[in-house]
Amino acid sequence: MFRTPDERFRDLPGYAFEPHYTEVGGLRMHHVDEGAGAPIVCFHGEPSWAYLYRKMLPPLVEAGHRVICPDLAGFGRSDKPTDRGWYSFDRHVEQIAGVLEPLNLTGATVVVQDWGGPIGLRWAIENADRVDRLVIMNTGLFTGRVSEGFLAWRAFAERNPDLPVGFVLQGATATELPGDVVAAYEAPFPTAESKAGAAQFPLLVPVEERAPGAAEMLVVSEALRSWDKPALVAFSDCDPVFPYPRSGEQFTRMIPGAGEQVCIEGASHFLQEDRGEAIAGHMLSFLSS
């Protein structure tokens, strides 16, 4: 197991949030917890961490919300098992459930993107009594069919177990990231062994119907077909992995409570990095309506 030294997280640009820790399954798990009011739980994907939500967090807190951003096991300030075989869809969900359970959330808005989609949406349907709304961005539920863009990403990750995190983030944003921001995304991962969770994630995506995780994601999809609570679906216009508008339309057709898909213009895969403040604005309009 690898624990990133605390000094790696000092003075990160735009990120002055206090860490909060919970012991779950023998790991120290981290989450950001800012503000007070109706809770908003933000699930990140790979190879990002809670830092991805730093632009959205202040306007949401200022509008009177409590914003919680957990780091998945293997990411951010959470502990990082170095055995790639440790990681699975089930285990990620179990770890996050262990972080969120003590917080006793009610009336939550669940925000998901990338791998945060399968994990966060599964948590939402398994805790539907705690969740009032969904915000779904640049993600999918993988039940055996994936895009060519994803297959290219999977092949890249398989060839590069020492995943170049900063290079990946820079390549999956529409804006040019400053060096200190790239360094902040790399901060949790100082060694190859610390990247085991990030390197394994692409291989956890089921690319055939019988693959591990496919049946569980199908259950989530079926549950969303009867989800009549409000859902905001917002996908960016420049994401090769989840192309607009087709990827978002899968959710607007699936979820009875979803309105028309919102296009986040001038953004790529990590749209929170490209247009975080604009997304927060869309969310606040959605929450107030």
Image (cartoon, helix red, strand yellow):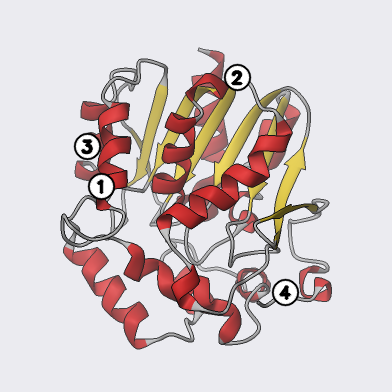
- Depth-wise, is mark 4 or mark 2 nearer the camera? 4
What is the distance, in whole Å, between disc 1 and disc 3 at their CAs?
18 Å
Judging by the rendered image, the residue that carries numbered circle 1 is 215
- In the image shown, does 8 or 268 lie closer to the viewer? 8
- Residue beneath the point at 57% across and 35% down: 280
What is the distance, in whole Å, between disc 4 and disc 3 at their CAs?
38 Å
**Does label 4 or label 2 sit earlier along the sequence?**
4
Judging by the rendered image, the residue that carries numbered circle 4 is 3
Residue type, numbered disc 2 = Gly
Q: Position of residue 252 (x, y in %)?
A: 26, 28
What is the distance, in whole Å, between disc 2 and disc 3 at their CAs?
25 Å
Judging by the rendered image, the residue that carries numbered circle 3 is 250
Residue type, numbered disc 1 = Ala
Q: Say whether marks 1 and 4 touch (CB < 8 Å).
A: no
- Residue beneath the point at 29% across and 73% down: 154
Residue type, numbered disc 4 = Arg
Q: Is residue 244 visible?
A: no
Judging by the rendered image, the residue that carries numbered circle 2 is 107
Please state if 128 lies on the left or on the right of 187 as rendered. left
